[in-house]
Image: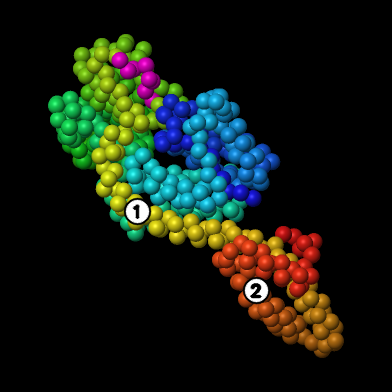
């Protein structure tokens, strides 16, 4: 068996490619079922965010398994192999484990140290469990990745400060406002007329950072206005005007800054819509949705400036140097956590031999116990029988403790294989003696 990951991210693919591979939560179960249906894939879990799509698997054959995942991605996205392949990465065994630890800790994120990715890894674990696409190996790996992400955030300062896509989007708005005024610095957003489209987790963070950067009033538009009102109520110091999404055209004509973060599979703002609106003001659009909420054809429209998640790099690079030093501290924690998982993974090689050894000794114990009890006669009480049986089981467990511990202890693979071979020869262990 081989642990492998195939995927793409903001490091390897532009947003126009990433949005075509995005897998919504509604289609997650079917995607997992399709992948698990391949004979090469024994376990699978999918991480789909605005900046990455990664498929973690336990496969029978490394090459055939990775090929099966790539085929799935091609069919799902409708992108030809020639176009898609250059954007895909794949990692195997130790590299796959190390990559997941980095992802969960925020070390592979666009915004170094972002906290939202840990929640997304938790969600990947939960969905894999809910849809029964994972077994003991990926369940253990993803659980350890979550605990590693928590550990990095508690033992380093990587998670402090502005470390989310939403915070970077607000900083980008500040930076662009400053540049329009002839300065290369972050400006307060107090004078901006701001709207946020969407009422999910990303929008919550947008409101949080907008409030911190000087906004006094924000229009919040959402398909379900009740959800928008619930979100707005969490910001009593910020005047949040909640409107249904049907009033988006009004905001497009009256606002100077609009953020979009919805789960829509298709753009909600395009050139056709903007050209029909009577606008006299300059409008800056910042889209942090993937798939994109704002169509690419809005570029070039007079008095419109549009940005997507890939444009956040301009802000991220300003904060990256200080975080890189903290990231070096976190790397040591990741190496330790990765080593612990791999030691557990490698120790599983000993499990079939241990099971056969235990079954062999249990067979001897049961046989000898029955002989002894038959000689004791009818005067031997049921309580005494239980005591003798417990005694025999205790002896077997004591005998097994040291060899089992030694066989599963961290060691070179060659050494473990030598030990397993010796045990099998000494106890004449036949693979058919017990289910592995």
User: Is residue 390 visible in the rendered structure shown here?
Assistant: no
Q: Main secondary structure of the magenta part?
A: loop
| On screen, residue 232 above or below 94 | above
* Closer to the eye: label 2 or 1: 1
Provide the residue designation for mark 2: 403
Provide the residue designation for mark 1: 328
- Colour scheme in the image? rainbow
Secondary structure state at the residue bearing disc 1: helix
Q: Nearer the viewer, residue 112 or 31?
A: 112
Tell me the CA gap for discs 2 and 1. 39 Å
Q: Nearer the viewer, residue 221 or 122?
A: 122
For disc 1, the neighbor class at 10 Å (few under 14, some 14 to 19, many from 20) is few
Residue 306 pos. (x, y %): 30, 23
Let me know if residue 295 is in the magenta part.
yes
Let me know if residue 409 is in the magenta part.
no
Q: Residue at x 32, y 21 (%)?
A: 248
For disc 2, the neighbor class at 10 Å (few under 14, some 14 to 19, many from 20) is some
Describe residue 430's horizontal placement relative to residue 312 as left or right: right
Quarter location, residue 185: top left
Describe residue 311's horizontal placement relative to residue 141 as left or right: left
Q: Residue at x 58, y 53 (%)?
A: 137
- The magenta segment is 293-300
Quarter location, residue 109: top left
Residue farthest front in this picture: 414
| On screen, residue 96 above or below 15 | below
Secondary structure state at the residue bearing disc 2: helix
Q: Residue at x 35, y 34 (%)?
A: 199
Q: Which of 421 and 385 is in front in this view?
A: 421
Q: Which of 91 and 202 is in front in this view?
A: 91
Residue 283 image label: none
């Amino acid at each position: 068996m081989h642990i492998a990951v195939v995927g793409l991210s903001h490091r390897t693919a532009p947003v126009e490619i990433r949005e075509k591979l995005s897998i919504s939560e509604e289609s997650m179960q079917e995607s997992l079922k399709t992948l698990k249906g391949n004979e090469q894939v024994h376990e699978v879990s999918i991480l789909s965010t605005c900046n990455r799509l990664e498929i973690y698997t336990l496969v029978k054959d490394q090459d055939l398994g990775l090929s099966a995942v790539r085929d799935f991605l091609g069919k799902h996205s409708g992108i030809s192999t020639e176009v898609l392949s250059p954007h895909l990465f794949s990692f195997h065994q130790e590299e796959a484990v190390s990559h997941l630890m980095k992802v969960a800790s925020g070390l592979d994120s666009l915004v170094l140290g972002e906290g939202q990715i840990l929640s997304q890894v938790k969600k990947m674990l939960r969905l894999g469990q809910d849809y029964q696409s994972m077994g003991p190996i990926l369940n253990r790996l993803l659980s350890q990745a979550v605990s590693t992400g928590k550990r990095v955030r508690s033992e380093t300062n990587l998670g402090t400060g502005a470390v989310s896509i939403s915070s970077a989007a607000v900083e980008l708005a500040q930076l662009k406002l400053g540049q329009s005024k002839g300065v290369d610095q972050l400006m307060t957003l107090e004078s901006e007329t701001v709207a946020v489209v969407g009422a999910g987790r990303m929008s919550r963070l947008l409101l949080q950072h907008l409030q911190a950067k000087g906004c006094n009033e924000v229009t919040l538009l959402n398909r379900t206005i009740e959800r928008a009102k619930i979100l707005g109520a969490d910001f009593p110091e910020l005047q949040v005007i909640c409107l249904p999404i049907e009033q988006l055209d009004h905001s497009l004509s009256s606002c100077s800054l609009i953020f979009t973060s919805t789960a829509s599979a298709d753009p909600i703002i395009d050139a056709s819509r903007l050209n029909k609106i009577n606008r006299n003001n300059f409008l800056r659009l910042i889209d942090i949705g993937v798939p994109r909420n704002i169509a690419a054809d809005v570029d070039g429209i007079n008095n419109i400036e549009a940005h997507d998640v890939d444009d956040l790099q301009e802000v991220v690079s300003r904060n990256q140097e200080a975080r890189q030093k903290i990231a070096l501290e976190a790397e040591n924690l990741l190496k330790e956590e990765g080593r612990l998982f791999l030691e557990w993974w490698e120790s599983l090689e000993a499990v079939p031999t241990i099971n056969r050894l235990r079954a062999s000794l249990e067979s001897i114990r049961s046989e000898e116990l029955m002989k002894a009890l038959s000689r004791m006669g009818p005067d031997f009480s049921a309580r005494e029988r239980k005591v003798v049986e417990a005694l025999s089981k205790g002896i077997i467990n004591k005998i097994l403790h040291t060899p089992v511990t030694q066989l599963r202890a961290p060691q070179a693979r060659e050494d473990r294989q030598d030990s397993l071979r010796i045990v099998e020869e000494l106890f004449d262990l036949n693979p058919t003696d017990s289910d592995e």
